[in-house]
Image (cartoon, coloured by chain):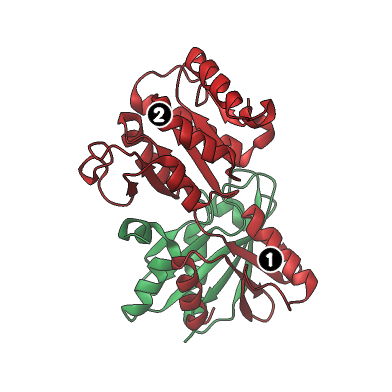
Amino acid sequence: MTEREAMRDVLEEASRWLDDGHRVALATVVQTWGSSPRQPGSQLAVRDDGLFAGSVSGGCVEGRVVEQALEVMQGGDPRVLTFAVSNEEAWDVGLACGGEVQIFVEAVTP
Amino acid sequence: MKRATLQALQAARRAKRPVALVADLGGGREQLVYGDALDGLAPELAEAVAEALRTDRARRDGDRFVQPYPPPLRLLVVGAVHVAQKLVPMARAADYDVTVIDPRPAFASAARFGEGVTLEAEWPDEVIERLAPDARTAIVTLTHDPKIDDPGLVAALRSGAFYVGALGSRKTHGKRCARLRDEGFDDAAIARIHGPVGLPLGGRSPAEIAISVMAQITQVLRAPRGDG
């Protein structure tokens, strides 16, 4: 893998953060319904200071996912988040595309 | 995910070994399953992993989530010409491993392509046979020179590449098809070649042609039945 490829690879970025002594959580799209900007398997890596790489939506739900990821990193259980138009909270965070997405959030553990 | 799992996953990806992460969304357990070591697994799991790697699609089934990490898509470019200089960075942005093949050393020079691409200053048939193109490999010929393009196309048609394209006008392509027929390829084989290459976007410049080629490769990969 060249350096340029490594830079855009979410897991490579996560690995580098771990090497640097950070805690890291991963968020992965596991299922989608209707129109959703990112397919299952799309990933977001979150660092313990809130920096993130990758994406799990077109940018609509990343903020909320980062919050949850920080909680999981601090000892919370892995969790599956659901964002949908029918869910008012999700509407607030802005999944305006009319889809529904489930995202698995887990910490990288030693 | 355990850090050791992440490290093993990244090692497999660097080695270009097909691998899938099988995660239990309920209990948080996970395992790596290698595409070249499916024997001995529960048949249902082996099939799910093989399917995910084949289609490059992650899939949830109840609490089980299978995320495939197939080796990267590959693009083999015959002809280290101006269009290739534009096409290579586009293909890299779309996550292809790119190899540029041109037996003329003055063309296949690192100074013309920079880093992040493999250059092969050899005959295309030899290189293509060695690289064994598969269902995740696209091949495009860009030189206009039958001496260079034709051996590349012959090797491409004998491979399992998902896309074969050849730059050249309709007239050039007609002559090319006639030569390939003389080489013994039937109409079905020759019909695999996209020529004139690229989606008909109307562009003329090297960058515009590269866009139309990259767009067509993407269409054939992702929407094969929409291929015109």
In this view, which residue lies farthest toward the top? B171
Expressed as whole percent of the image width and height from the top left, the position of residue A1 reads 38, 62
For the point 51% across and 14% down, the residue is B170
Expressed as whole percent of the image width and height from the top left, the position of residue A106 reads 55, 75
Kindly state the secondary structure of the residue where label 1 is placed.
helix
| Chain ID, mark 1 | B
Q: Colour of chain B?
A: red
User: Which mark identifies residue B147?
Assistant: 2
In this view, which residue lies farthest toward the left? B111
Q: Is residue B63 visible?
A: yes
Q: Which of A20 and B139 is in front in this view?
A: B139
- On screen, residue A4 above or below B174: below
For the point 66% across and 30% down, the residue is B226
For the point 44% across and 32% down, the residue is B141
Quadrant (top left, top right, bottom left, bottom right) of the N terminus of chain B: bottom right
Q: Which amino acid does label 1 sit on?
A: Val
Expressed as whole percent of the image width and height from the top left, the position of residue A102 reads 64, 61
Q: Gap in Å between the C-alphas at discs 2 and 1?
A: 43 Å
Quadrant (top left, top right, bottom left, bottom right) of the C terminus of chain B: top right
Kindly state the secondary structure of the residue where label 2 is placed.
helix
Q: Which amino acid does label 2 sit on?
A: Lys
Q: Chain A is drawn in which colour?
A: green
Expressed as whole percent of the image width and height from the top left, the position of residue A66 reads 47, 66
For the point 25% across and 46% down, the residue is B114
- On screen, residue B155 above or below B60: above
Q: Mark 1 points at which residue?
A: B49
